[in-house]
């Protein structure tokens, strides 16, 4: 029996035979294919291969058995979701829906997703959120599928898609234009495949094998340290002691006078949703299943693609550079946390109150807002139990009400 990991490695190999550059983006895109109802967004400028990559991945998984709709073609709801079967309505008075091929296909593609009209976007969004579609009061469940979309965010478009819609895409990869040497490489690949890179792409993984792979990946266990690393990493991008999520004031104004202004939270206007955590866990499982292990460095690298479309930064000149810089700071911060053994200390305090450990924890919390957040909760518990006075708490020390 063929090792199913070899299928995935072969898929990457066949894609890279026909696609030039952007190896990191291709790799994380393939890892993201390995879980149920996988969704991928490819962003790039015109002519940089976003449609080609979408088609290569779909052909590698589904052969010719996939459906692509185009936002630029004024696609209508009936073509995407379903339409009434008129003969049934006329002869029997029965409203029967003919579900569109896009709904039924296991492989789905959307070209220029930023050009979809709002009504069609709403229907696709509902499918991605609940795994179902509605038309004329009838419901159809979408089975396990792969949805890959692409867009050029810099194009002038008719419609601006809402942030919650983009949040439904597991990862978003950005493609770079080709260097001179890569242009020559692409020309050579085109010659090798008769100027037909996409149609030369074979189906590498059967649908049955893909389902089995997704089951195995889902059952892959991550150790508590890896799960803890992921949870803390994403929380660092979410946490705000001034309740950023419900405030009408955004950073940097909101952060003026805050004790934690040097941390990642002050660089984030709109924090990522909890889906970022879910996706990063899925990617970590896929990486461990495929490669045998997943390290903290792997998680930091994959986090870029899980966060890039989910957060709005204070500085947006170059979103990839900004996120890479923030993630590098996170990497250094995680090392500091490990050296201070702060999570061990916190676990001990969860078990029982110790004045000595609490004093150490307060010193750590002044330098770590996520750690401080956990200590706040413990302090409230200890105050109710009579073990601590309010004026002795970390909040009192920091002057937080």
Image (spheres, helix red, strand yellow):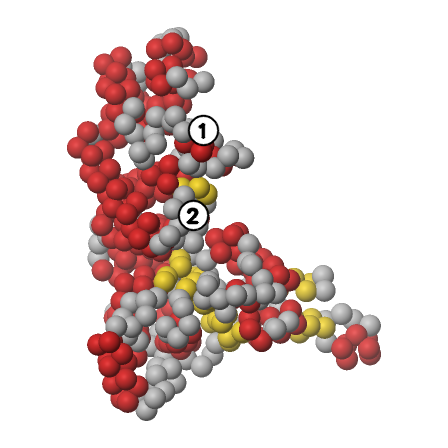
Question: Residue 286 at x, y = what percent?
Answer: 31, 58
**Residue 395 picture location, percent across and down:** 38, 18
> Which residue is at a point 25% across and 21% down the rendered structure image?
363
Residue nearest the viewer, comparing 319 with 280: 319
Q: Is residue 67 visible?
A: yes
Q: Residue at x 26, y 12 (%)?
A: 355
- The residue under label 2 is 311
Q: Is residue 23 above or below residue 278?
A: below
Residue beneath disc 1 = 242
Q: Earlier in the sequence, mark 1 or mark 2?
A: 1
User: Where, quadrant-wise, is the C terminus in this rendering?
Assistant: top left
On screen, residue 82 versus residue 156, left or right, reads: right
Q: As drawn, is 102 to the left or to the right of 34?
A: right
What secondary structure is found at the residue carrying circle 2? loop
Q: Decide: few, some or many residues near mark 1? Use Cα within 10 Å; few <14, some 14-19, many ≥20.
A: few
Label 2: how many residues lie within 10 Å, few (<14), some (14-19) or many (20+)? many
Quarter of the figure with residue 159: bottom right
- Image point (32%, 91%), residue name: 194
User: Tag 1's secondary structure?
Assistant: loop
User: In which image quadrant can residue 76 be found?
Assistant: bottom right
């Amino acid at each position: 029996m063929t090792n199913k990991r070899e299928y995935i490695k072969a898929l990457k190999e066949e894609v890279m035979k026909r696609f030039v550059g952007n190896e990191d983006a291709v790799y994380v895109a393939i890892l993201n294919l390995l879980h149920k109802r996988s969704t991928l967004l490819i962003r790039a400028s015109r002519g940089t291969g976003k449609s080609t990559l979408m088609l290569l991945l779909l052909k590698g998984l589904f052969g010719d058995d996939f459906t692509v709709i185009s936002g630029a073609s004024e696609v209508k709801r009936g073509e995407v979701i379903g339409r009434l079967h008129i003969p049934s309505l006329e002869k029997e008075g029965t409203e029967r829906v003919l579900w569109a091929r896009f709904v039924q296909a296991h492989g789905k593609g959307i070209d220029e997703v930023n050009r979809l009209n709002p009504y069609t976007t709403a229907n696709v969004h509902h499918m991605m959120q609940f795994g179902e579609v509605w038309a004329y009061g009838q419901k159809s469940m979408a089975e396990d599928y792969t949805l890959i979309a692409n867009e050029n965010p810099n194009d002038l478009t008719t419609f601006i898609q809402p942030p919650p819609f983009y949040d439904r895409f597991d990862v978003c990869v950005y493609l770079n234009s080709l260097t001179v040497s890569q242009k020559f490489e692409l020309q050579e690949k085109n010659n090798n495949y008769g100027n037909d890179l996409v149609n030369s792409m074979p189906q590498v993984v059967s649908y049955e094998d893909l389902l089995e792979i997704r089951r195995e990946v889902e059952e892959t266990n991550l150790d508590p340290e890896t799960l803890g690393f992921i949870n803390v990493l994403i929380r660092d991008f979410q946490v705000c002691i001034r309740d950023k999520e419900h405030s009408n004031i955004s950073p940097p104004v909101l952060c003026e006078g805050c004790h934690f202004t040097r941390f990642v939270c002050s660089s984030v206007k709109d924090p990522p949703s909890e889906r970022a955590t879910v996706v990063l866990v899925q990617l970590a499982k896929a990486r461990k299943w495929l490669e045998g292990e997943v390290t903290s460095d792997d998680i930091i690298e994959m986090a870029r693609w899980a966060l890039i479309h989910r957060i709005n930064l204070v500085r947006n000149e170059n979103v990839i550079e900004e996120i890479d810089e923030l993630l590098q700071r996170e990497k250094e911060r995680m090392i500091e946390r490990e050296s201070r053994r702060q999570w061990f200390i916190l676990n001990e305090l969860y078990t029982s109150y110790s004045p000595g450990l609490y004093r150490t924890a307060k010193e750590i919390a002044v330098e770590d807002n996520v750690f401080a957040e956990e200590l706040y909760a413990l302090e409230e518990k200890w105050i109710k139990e009579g073990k601590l006075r309010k004026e002795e708490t970390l909040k009192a020390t920091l002057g937080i009400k």
